[in-house]
Image (spheres, helix red, strand yellow):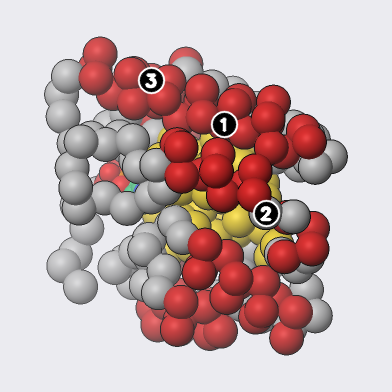
Amino acid sequence: MSVADKIRHYQSQLPPHVTLVAVSKFQPVEVLQEAYEAGQRVFGESREQELRTKHDLLPADIRWHFVGHLQTNKVKYIAPFISLIHSVDSERLLDEINRQALRNNRVIDVLLQLHIATEETKSGFLPDELLTLLSQTDIAQRWPAVRLCGMMGMASLTHDEAQIVREFRMLRQCYQALLDGPLAAQGITADTFAELSMGMSDDYLLAIEEGGTMVRIGSGIFGVRPTP
Ligand SMILES: *Cc1c(COP(=O)(O)O)cnc(C)c1O
């Protein structure tokens, strides 16, 4: 199947409430263009420099999502145009995104990344850390230019489906606990804190069953990734 066929395949298979994020990291612009021509408008990248280059070369109506680990000193480069940052994993990063959003006169949408996998290498907040942070912070005052739109998680790299489901449930439970607790207390509801970004090529069906609203599909669309 061509990239265009894959895009149409996923678009027709996913429930209407689920957004397909085409994770195009390391793929050349021609391949993204092909996906674009098949109707894909949401692309996920994980490196700031690569994202900027592609943003400059490809159509302006693409919504660019950042899905990888984001260093605070790189926020300024993507702040003018980024549509959603999935991978917010620290207080410092939230502060910097807010600062750069203000400088660009815009509000930046973000997801809070939760550490749900067993691998130490994957980043993200711990559930308690997030509960404490949001309980002790006046969100509107500290991050007026950031909109908390939901949460993201990456399950462990394993074939054990029961474990993957447990990890997705942990994400969903944390999402609900934040909504019912510190977010409700500050007037933030599921109207805006609405997204659960979970699921990649190998586990997106499980993720959707567990309540995922955004799936991040790379190799399932583009095939094996070229090495950067
Ligand atoms: C690369 C990447 C993906 C896509 O992974 P595939 O297994 O190729 O679908 C999804 N999410 C994040 C955060 C990634 O870095």
Q: Quadrant of the C terminus?
A: bottom left
| Neighbours of disc 1 within 10 Å: few (<14), some (14-19), many (20+) | many
Per the image, the residue denoted by label 1 is 175
Does the rendering let one see residue 228?
A: yes
Q: Is mark 3 within 8 Å of ligand 1?
A: no
Look at the numbered discs 2 and 3 and tell me whether their residues touch, using CB distance below 8 Å: no
Indicate which disc, 2 or 3, sits on the residue closer to the N terminus. 2
Residue type beneath disc 2: Thr
Give the residue number, with chain letter if any, for mark 2. Answer: 137
Q: Is residue 7 left or right of residue 213?
A: left
Crowd class of label 3 (few under 14; some 14 to 19; many from 20; radius 10 Å): some
The reply to whether the residue tagged 2 has its Cβ within 8 angstroms of ligand 1 is no
Residue beneath disc 3? 206
> Which residue is more in the foreground, 168 or 141?
141
User: Mark 1 touching mark 2, by CB under 8 A?
Assistant: no
**Which of labels 1 and 3 is toward the front?**
1
Residue at point 57%, 65% (across, down): 94
Q: Is residue 70 above or below residue 128?
A: below
Q: Quadrant of residue 32?
A: bottom left
Where residue 47 sits: x, y (%)? 37, 72
* Front in this rendered view, residue 207 or 181: 181
Looking at the rendered structure, the kind of residue marked 1 is Tyr
x and y, in percent, of residue 138 in the image:
74, 55
Cα distance, mark 1 to mark 2? 17 Å
Helix, strand, or loop for circle 2? Answer: loop
Instruction: Indicate the amino acid at tag 3.
Output: Leu
Q: CA distance from mark 2 to mark 3?
A: 33 Å
- Select label 1 or label 2 by which is in front: 2
Mark drawn on residue 80: none
- The first of marks 1 and 2 along the sequence is 2
